[in-house]
Each structure stands twice: as C-alpha cells, then as structure tokens.
Amino acid sequence: MLRHGLVGIVLGGTLTITASSIAQPKFDHDYSTYALILSQFVVDDRVDYRRLADNRDSLDTVVEELSAVSRLTFNAWSREKRLAYWINVYNLFTLRMIVDHYPIQGSWFSLYPRNSIQQIDGAWDTITWKAGGQTVTLDEIEHDILRPTFNEPLLHFAINCAAVSCPPLRNEPYRADTLKTQLADSTRKTLAKTNWLRLHDDTLYLTAILDWFGEDFVSHFGQTVGANRAERDRAFLGLVATYGPREIASLAHTGTPKIRFLKYDWTLNDISER
C-alpha cells in the first residue's frame, strides 16, 4: 500500500502515480486548535499577549495549518467556509505579528501610542503571509479579498487589528455553519461599546471605522431608515437601527440624529493595558 493516500497503477510492470490520485489534506473547519488559543488567551475583549508569547507553540502550529491550505482545496469550499477562513486568517496573522514583536515599545520620537501595532514596520502592507494558496499582506486580505469578494459589511465587526478601538476579538473562531449568527452577534456586542457608538443629546458618535468604510454599508443598510439624508448617513442610521442598543436604535429609526465620528485609539488591546 502506498503512503500518504497515493494510488498506484501498474502499467507494464511500472508503478505509476497519477496526479489526480493525490488526496488533499482534510481541513478542520471547526478550527479546533485555534479555538483553544482564543479561549485561553482572549479575556474580556483583550488579549493576554504576554502569556501567549510565552506559550506560542500552539499559535505557530495553527498558523502553519491555515497557511498550508492550497488554492485547489480553498476553491472547492463554499462561500461561508471561504469567508470564515479569511476572517480567521486575518485575526490569526495579526495575533502572530504582535507576538513576533512583543513587547512593542516604540521610541520617544515615534507615533503615539508607543505600544501600537503601528510601530511595526510594514504591518499591513509589507509583511507577507501564505493563505489560500497565495502570498498576501493583511491589507490585501482586507481590501483585495474580503471586502470586494464577499460584499459583507459586518466583517468590519469581525476582523481585529489589535487596537483598543478595533471590534473586540471573539474568544472563538468564525465557522461556516454559525457565521451569520456570529457576525450579527459581534456587531451587536461591538455597537454596545461606547468606544464604537454613543449618544449625546441629538448626536450619534460612531467609530471612525464606519467613516473609513462607509460605502461598504450603503447597499445593505441605506434603505432601512426612511430619511432625507445622504446615503452614507442613511446607511449608518440603518445599521444602528438594526444592531444598536434599544434606545439608540429607536432614535436612529427616526432618521433625525446628527452623526459625528470618534477618535480612533490605536493602543494595543493587551490585557496588561487595563
């Protein structure tokens, strides 16, 4: 018997191995190893980077597992499996990048805050990773793959850039069979946080992420609230009306609140920063 699932065909006394007979490795769509990491090191929306750095073997293992996915294997997956994979890959590679540079300590002349992912040269556009059978940066995952391919605005509540103002990192992986529910849950939990959404008098203060990527929400939420407003504003109000806390959602439904954006806090989402 041939090893590694290869099938041999004897032709004229010669053993021939056909390319089509090479079994593709089975991928764990439950992300069991990654799930264990998240359950152990994500605590109350923060990451215990120090302990994770001291126990990084499992992290390195799951990076290898997700990086080993071939293009052939990836292309055979459903939309939900591909979307869950790319979200998990983005968050996993971000964790690995922080651990690789931990503790992050910028100089006194660097941008504030000095423990930010921004202190890592090329964090988004130069440092590369293997995923889905290709070489990618974090920027390419987000802007060239996730956003244009899947047209799913709620992914902005799922991918985590290791900053306090990022949506909280879930303590579980995203999975294809629960993806819709997880995205909705992450959106509700994120909008319940005052560094993402707050109401003061007649003004809604929203995360800067919505300002940066507002166009991604227009097609999904632009018609949720009937109001004579710019389409981006209608989309923001529709999003808040759908997923925001009850009192704020009710006000958003009226279409009347003013909209302003909050300053973004790039402080590392490290548990030690609490």
Image: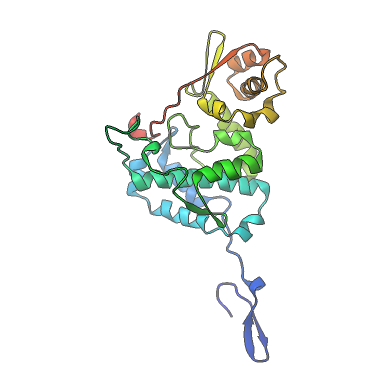
Judged left or right of residue 226, residue 23 is: left
Q: Position of residue 89 (x, y in %)?
A: 52, 47
Q: Position of residue 22 (x, y in %)?
A: 62, 71
Q: Which image quadrant: the N terminus?
A: bottom right
As drawn, which residue projects farthest toward the top? Answer: 201
Looking at the image, residue 6 lies above or below residue 236: below
Which color scheme is applied? rainbow
Q: Position of residue 92 (x, y in %)?
A: 47, 46
Q: Give the tally of numbered discs.
A: 0
Which one is nearer the viewer's eye here, 250 or 118?
Answer: 118
Q: Is residue 180 visible?
A: yes
Judged left or right of residue 29, residue 266 is: left
Q: Position of residue 250 (x, y in %)?
A: 64, 14
Judged left or right of residue 259, residue 218 is: right
Which one is nearer the viewer's eye here, 236 or 41?
Answer: 236
Q: Is residue 173 visible?
A: no
Q: Residue at x 70, y 19 (%)?
A: 225
Q: Residue at x 37, y 46 (%)?
A: 99
Q: Which image quadrant: the C terminus?
A: top left
Looking at the image, residue 255 lies above or below residue 93: above
Looking at the image, residue 207 lies above or below residue 250: below
As drawn, which residue projects farthest toward the bottom? Answer: 13
Q: Residue at x 34, y 45 (%)?
A: 101
Quarter-of-image position of residue 174: top right
